[in-house]
Image (cartoon, rainbow, N blue to C red):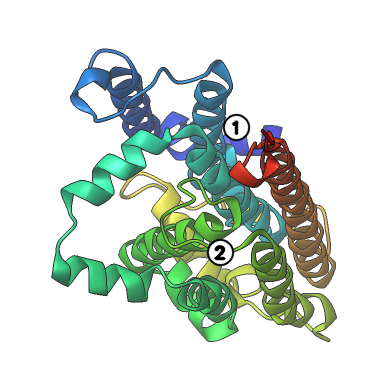
Amino acid sequence: MSVLFENFGFRALWTPELLVGLLIIGILYLLVITKWRHRFKDSKPVSLKQKIYFVLALVALYIGWGSPLYVAGHIMISFHMTQMVFAYFIATPLFLLGTPKWFFQAVIDRFRSPVTEKVFRVIWSPIVALFLFNGLFSFYHVPLMFDTLMQSVVLHSLYEYLLLFAAVLMWWHMIAPLPNAFPLSDLRRVGYIFANGILITPACALIIFAGAPLYQTYTDPTIWASVMAFCLPAGAEVPMALFSGPNSFAFLETRMDQQLAGVLMKIMQEITYGITIGYVFKQWLSKEKQQDGELTISDIPTVKS
């Protein structure tokens, strides 16, 4: 990692514009849950756990979209895949867990109308969410698509935002931060999580079992140089020594690096989905206990006179 610090400056390594943007989001979050909370209907104090979740989400998104991993991900695909894990499988669910229910409800009520309700019924459908994220994720890793996006800052950024939106839709139905909005039963939520795990497998398998390196971004020095140029100030010379040679940052052979990337994504996906299944079962058991403890009219013994 020291090689990166020797060849790249502060802006390339730490993405300060992203850091500032996330700090602003964090400040707005604190204002909403404290000073501005009274403006929201049925608002309640936010627990320390939720605050920690939201802060961790900001940190995870920064690691995924900025930090030295951003530069490293342009040199080795395993680092690029690590970025995706942080952004779409760690930051996204933490954002949903850290945001209070009354804020989600206020946003829904604010934009609710007969037209928007029909639109959101389609967009927020579990089936749409299921295929949108996994489809976008798989399409992203088609070699032609990947190399094209990596060579365009604008297109790559737009695709990242689209993936983040799709990830929010997907995780919404897993975590159910607002149970009465687009609900799935607990059993169907578990099935939905398994379905997501199955649909992401082909993309991981393509990367793991390919007989040769798939992406010119990591094999063609000309394309690599054009991609790396986006990490540097205008006019700066691309450090070609990082691509190959004794001072190369890539410490794995290209195909092995690609295989590691696919394995890493599949393992981390299984871990995050496994934790989520545990979370769903915990909610499920909690509901069952509440229902068992409720006193109904039929439970009250009648007194015969």
Which of 119/213 is in front? 119
Question: What crowding class fits label 1: few (fewer than 14 Cα within 10 Å), some (14-19), or many (20 or more)?
Answer: few
* Residue 220 percent across, percent down from the top left: 61, 75
Q: Is residue 11 above or below residue 118?
A: above
Q: State which quadrant residue 203 falls in.
A: bottom right
Give the side of residue 145 with respect to residue 190, left or right.
Answer: left
Q: Residues within 10 Å of mark 2 (few under 14, many from 20)?
A: some
Secondary structure under tag 1 reads: helix
Q: Where residue 140 appears, x then y in whole percent?
A: 53, 75
Quadrant containing the C terminus is top right
Q: Is residue 258 left or right of residue 10?
A: right
Q: Amino acid at mark 2?
A: Leu
**Label 2 belongs to which residue?**
184
Which residue occupies 80% across, 84% down?
210
121 w.r.t. 102: above or below: below
Quadrant showing the N terminus:
top right
Q: In the image, which disc is placed on residue 5?
A: 1
